[in-house]
Amino acid sequence: MSSSPRRRADALRSRTAVLDAAVQLLGEDPDAGMAAIAGAAGVTRQTVYAHFSSRDALLSAVAERMTEKVAEEMDAAGAYEGPAGEALLRLLDAAWRVSEAYPALIRLGGRPAAPEEDRVRHEPIADHIGRVLQRGRDGGEFDPGPALSWQVAAVIALSHATGEEVRAGRVSAADATAALHSGLLRLLAP
Amino acid sequence: MSSSPRRRADALRSRTAVLDAAVQLLGEDPDAGMAAIAGAAGVTRQTVYAHFSSRDALLSAVAERMTEKVAEEMDAAGAYEGPAGEALLRLLDAAWRVSEAYPALIRLGGRPAAPEEDRVRHEPIADHIGRVLQRGRDGGEFDPGPALSWQVAAVIALSHATGEEVRAGRVSAADATAALHSGLLRLLAP
DNA sequence: CTCATCTCTTACACCTTGTCAAAGTTTTCG
DNA sequence: CGAAAACTTTGACAAGGTGTAAGAGATGAG
């Protein structure tokens, strides 16, 4: 798919430098400006605009990179081995490991230009979870009563909420994950 | 409590006009600017600043008013009558009725200046839920194993997620509430 | 080496937040 | 009623962010 006839290696280098800097800075402060990102990337603000036409475009690219990374990590977590319950917990642990490095990035999905675009972007992650859930439903491990999409949303919401509780220091990480694990299994049980 | 020595009735009128307009406009578009809010309130931008020192201050006031309203509605929902499970569902229904009128306001809590301030602001709501949960734990209706604060967070997260699913049109309101109700009871069961 | 491609510099237009001071206007109190 | 205090308005301004534009300079591909 080398669609571009002549594309300089320099351009790609700048692009990834900007993306790396954006992931880093926005991970610390989601309100970081273009100037700050450009500076951290060792590049001028206008060069950033040469690769990302707007701030929203850059945010989208960052979000996309993160979901890619989470999806990769999930692939490596073995979603299709062993009981569905344990596989699900492995998936969530993998996602947690990736996203805890950039705490502020979780809140980026909040106000996308198009709400539909946001859903499409997060689809790969929801897809992984959905597949494991479906496997559990087929195998009699999970309740096939509620809509699958609701179960997916519930699992994600519960995971986020648990992560927030830990981050806020209201409960210990051990207690929270224990509660999340047993809670999830009870929530999904037939 | 007429603490202010001389406080004009005019001032209060303007203040509430601005707050009403802010609730309305921000409920439609959380990125509405100060000029738009002032215009909708029939007031100048500087008058808004006379009552709320910054945009964040206005946002805090809006959030506070919403939580007050939700708390009032929860009080009227009878949290201390009947089984704790049913009381909890009544509370959530009340909260849903209030907040569905201003869809975008839910996402306002996202980036507060001080994360701690945000928690304090939402405390009244979490408190109501926490009390019902505690009652259920004491009465053997709910599992006293997990931390109470985790259960509160889980209930709120599950409610929000369900609301989002309905808003996105992915599941019908009836299916979603049914799933939420049975899911919550299973999640909290001993 | 040469040219197309990319980057840098400089400059500008626009919007939003927040501040300031002075001139109205309305309410309250004597 | 009348005057003083409180509130609002008008108009202008600075600071900071996003986005655009044109031309000179640097860099890589062939």
Image (cartoon, coloured by chain):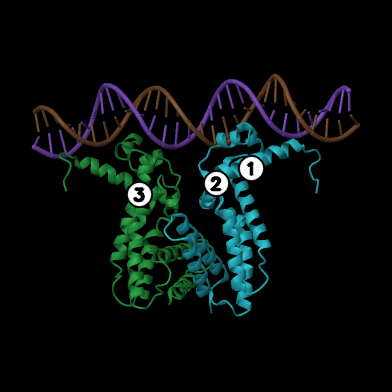
Chain colours: A green, B cyan, C brown, D purple
Is disc 1 placed on a helix, strand or loop? helix
Work out whether residue A148 or residue C20 is closer to the camera in this orientation and state it: A148
Q: Which is closer to the viewer, label 1 or label 2?
A: 2
Do marks 1 and 3 share a subunit? Answer: no
Is disc 2 placed on a helix, strand or loop? helix
Task: Report x, y in % for residue A102.
Answer: 41, 55
Task: Give the alpha-carbon distance from disc 1 to disc 3, as whole Å.
Answer: 35 Å
**Mark 2 — residue?**
B27
Seen at 39% across and 59% down, the residue is A99
**Mark 3 — residue?**
A62
Does residue A6 appear left or right of residue B151 in this picture?
left
**Mark 1 — residue?**
B19
Residue B56, visible in the rendered structure: no
In primary-sequence order, the first of circles 1 and 2 is 1
Residue B46, visible in the rendered structure: yes
Question: Please, what is the three-letter code of the amino acid marked with disc 2?
Answer: Gly
Kindly identify which numbered label has been placed on residue A5. none
Work out whether residue A147 or residue A112 is closer to the camera in this orientation and state it: A147
